[in-house]
Image: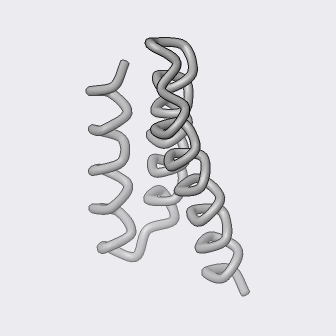
Amino acid sequence: MGWVGSAFIILGIWFVGDKSLWGFVFGALGNGLWVYVGLKRGKQYDLAVVALLATVLNIIGLYKWWG
């Protein structure tokens, strides 16, 4: 699950670099998967919090993109 999340984050960065809105979608999905991994596998709360904050920043970036 973590590898898939990482792949989505990398794709998200790639698409944002190409000025595509899909970057935000892939970034949010990847961070969401990392939140899941952090909470369900070994209860790594620090990882879950960082991934959750990255998701929030991703949403803020999307909002600014549209603004």
Residue, x 45% and y 47% (percent of image)? 26
- Pinpoint residue 66: horizontal percent, then vertical percent: 68, 80
Q: Is residue 47 left or right of residue 58?
A: left
Residue, x 60% and y 46% (percent of image)? 52
Residue, x 59% and y 73% (percent of image)? 61
Q: Which residue is at the front of the view, 35 or 5? A: 35
The answer to whether residue 16 is above or below residue 54 is below
Outermost residue toward the bottom in this view: 67
Q: Which residue is at the front of the view, 44 or 36? A: 44
Q: Which residue is at the front of the view, 40 or 17? A: 40
The answer to whether residue 36 is above or below residue 19 is above
Quarter of image, res 57: bottom right
- Pinpoint residue 48: horizontal percent, then vertical percent: 54, 36
The answer to whether residue 39 is above or below residue 40 is below
Outermost residue toward the top in this view: 41
Residue, x 47% and y 26% (percent of image)? 44
Q: Is residue 24 left or right of residue 8?
A: right
Q: Quadrant of the C terminus?
A: bottom right
Q: How is the image coloured?
A: one colour
Marks counted in the figure total 0
